[in-house]
Amino acid sequence: MLEITVNNVSHQLDVEPDTPLLWVVRDELKLTGTKFGCGMAQCGACTVHLDGVPIRSCVTPIAAVAGKAITTIEGISPHADTLHTVQQAWISEQVPQCGYCQSGQIMSAVALLDKNPSPSDEDIDNAMSGNVCRCGMYGRIRKAIKSASAAMATDVVLTPEGSSNG
Amino acid sequence: MGKWTRRAFLTSGALVGGGLIVGVGVGIGIRPGHRTPKLAEFMQEGGQVLVNAWVKILPDNSIRVIVPHAEMGQGVHTVLPMMLADEMDADWSTVSMEQAPAHDEYATADVAREFVLPSKAPGIVEDTLKGVFLKVAQSMSLQITGGSFSVRGTGAWSMRTAGAAARELLINAAAQEWQVPEDEIRTENSYLYHDKSGRSDQFVAFAKAAADKQGPATPRLKTPAQFNIMGKHVERFDIPPKVDGSATFGVDVDLPNMKYACVKCAPVFGSSVKSYDASAAQKMNGVVKVVELGAGIGVIADSYWQAKKALDQVIVEYTRVENIRLSSSEMFEQFGRDMDLAIEQGKEQEDYSQGEARKVLANADNVIEAEYRVPHLAHATMEPMNCTALERDGTLEIWAGLQNPLGTRDMLIEQFGYEKSQIVINNLYLGGGFGRRAMDDYPTQGAMLARALPGVPVKMIWSREEDTQQDFYRPAVLSRFKASLGSDGLPESWENQFVDKHEPVEAPTLPYSVPNQYIHYANSPTHIRFGPWRSVDHTQHAFFTESFIDELAIAAGKDPYQYRYDLLGDDLRSREVLETAAKMADWGKELPEGWGQGIAFHRSFNTIVAQVVEVDMSSGKPRVDKVYCATDPGYAMSPDGFIAQMESGIIYGLTAALYGDITVKDGAVVESNFHNYKMLRMNEAPEIAVEIINSGDTSLGGGGEPGTPPIAPALANAVFAISGKRIRSLPIG
């Protein structure tokens, strides 16, 4: 038995320890927002957060993350009934086309903005170049990251007491 | 814009369905018999009234549009409802959509027509053709999402007419109820109004009465000035579920007691399993069954990971086939030989001819010649091929993302002997299509695996390696040119010979006026499987013709933009597109050392596109900094969606131009995953500016594909402008 915590819920799992986290999240926990793309950490479709840091779940054995806090796209918003600012920006910039890579893109973008609230173009390049978008929506992703960054900065100004960036 | 549609409608005659259901004969009326009662079985739930084949009015007066195409990111699940709702005067905030089931009534005749006929037929025969091609489509079971056709075919010819007809039926019913003339009734936001008497009511109040009416023979379509929804910015329906992980793609299906499968097929196409040893695999944890699939082996297990690990332990011997030693370079040698042979033996396949190109060339002083080539390309959709299937009591149910669900169904019928009623197809979001998901190899495998384990749902997921090495590829192509210039520097003769002819048939033809042309091809088949790749034959031919025309411009000592402009002659729409792109880019402007511009122009799927790229080669390798794209699709129904399609097509084509290279060694595809089949990424993605010209043309152009063809030649032409090195072979690398 292995124990992992995903989106603040802890799970006891009876899976082979070399099973990649990706397949545990998708097939055991039924959180299918995290996608399989390449199986060798080349495309970023499977990106989740491990203690807040983006990792490629397709090459991360479940045994390596036992006891750690994992966040998937389904748990990325701090509030259950509203979207994360980054997700909202993804809608307002109409980013996704086929949408298959976008969970991974959003996970990488959230991790970037958590660490660096006002990223430069170069910061965006560095943080996002591990995520392939075959529909080629890179320009929209860049724009959405910037508008999310601006929205988060505005939120802080408008709500001096709260730190929520919803 | 409505002329064609009205005529088609007139010919079809309106249909009256039985009971509460009215069928509007949109492109299907030529076929005798009433169609809507049959459809209603599929689409009607409690309390809903099917007003016509494409729209329902729900009890709460909201509108649901039935869309016959798959959503693969092109926005069709939103733009087709926009077109119908606008004509109907529906309240957009209450409009929703559902995807049509895979059923014959939703066959998309227009796709068949487009691929069979090279160009628009004279108006007088259109109606007949429409009927003929509907029959063709139905007999071929086409419900294809492809050919950039959803908006310009289904949307323009069916959705708008259906919306307008539904509106007129409602007006007719209200006029009768209120005892007022029809022309005194107006519609707005899903309400009917008679201003003189102050009466008004919801659409749904008249839905049942409307259902008993004779459909209008000539529903009046709006002019662009009357559009309320078309041409406006509308947020796509499919985006919210794509940002929170809730969208269900084919690979996301979850069924009770489901098992998982991995497959591996023979690396050399045409080869199959000769023998295999699965004894080790069968002993592994969770393994349920090892299945021979003819061309390969599938392992079914309790989990994906168990299936994958077990598959790696199956030892397979494949049959030896003729092509087992073939390589990419040998294929190109074969192409060259077959092209020479065709000329020597007078067996050229003529594609297009005007004037006397050969004769002019024979007498010309300065013949310019060049040979171009492009490699095989894989589609590399982000979602690898997958299919979930359940065989139970002689019925087969499939869950997958399919560009051609009816074709898939018919293939399953043919291959496994089912009746139509024994197959259910659930078509889900496609994680990329680009033509790949029009093929039915993966549903075949899914069905084979499910049939090996009746009563148990089996989800088969390909590895990225399988997806890359078992594709249906954009073919490798060799193309040779000869041209001569007149005293004005403009081409006087143009000869082009190439291999591998598919669709659309007009792909190799020139948009320019050249008096003497001879375009021909030679057949030179290989064992590598062909499949439609975004823009199909346009992808290679735009690179060939737009590069070679650039060579002619240089040879004539002319500016490449001006040369094209002059050659477009009296094609004013094309000239405007080209000129717009040049203006957007400030063509000819001063740029830093090592930077330069390149231009290309191409019309495909009835959309005209010109692109100028700004390229930085100061590091020695080309980096595309900016792309300026001007385009005239006639009218962009969803402008932001259209822009997104151009952006997407450009990145797709640029990825191929810079990196795309599927090579063959010993008969098998070498590349396997994104480390050796490289994708363009964020740090290499250019800034893209798109300008749409709504020329108001009465025939709409597509959006999904036309952005792709010009980008490779635009880049190659920029590389020449900067370095003097002419790129005649892709990828540029």
Image: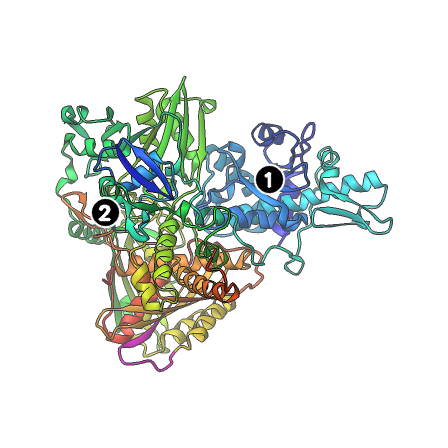
- Which of these two is toward me, B78 or B363? B78
Considering the numbered disc 2 on the image, is that residue within a helix, a strand or a loop?
Answer: loop
Look at the picture and state if B230 lies above or below B35.
Answer: below
Task: Output the chain of dot 2.
Answer: A
At 20% from the left edge and 35% from the top edge, which residue is drawn?
B266
Residue B529 among those drawn in magenta: no
- Determine crowd level at label 2: few under 14, some 14-19, many 20+ residues with C-alpha closer than 10 A: some
At 33% from the left edge and 48% from the top edge, which residue is drawn?
A48
Badge 2 amino acid: Met
Q: How many marks?
A: 2
Mark carried by residue B54: 1
Q: Name the residue under label 2.
A: A40
At 40% from the left edge and 71% from the top edge, which residue is drawn?
B564
Residues at circles 1 and 2 in contact by the CB criterion of under 8 Å: no
**Residue A118: % across, % down:** 39, 67
**Residue A63: % across, % down:** 22, 40
Position of the C terminus of chain B by quadrant? bottom left
Residue B593 among those drawn in magenta: yes
**Residue B647: % across, % down:** 41, 60
- Looking at the rendering, which quadrant does residue B480 occupy? bottom left
Is residue B360 shown to the viewer in this render? no
**Residue B707: % across, % down:** 41, 59
- Looking at the rendering, which quadrant does residue B628 occupy? bottom left
Task: Output the chain of dot 1.
Answer: B
Part of the protein shown in magenta:
B588-600
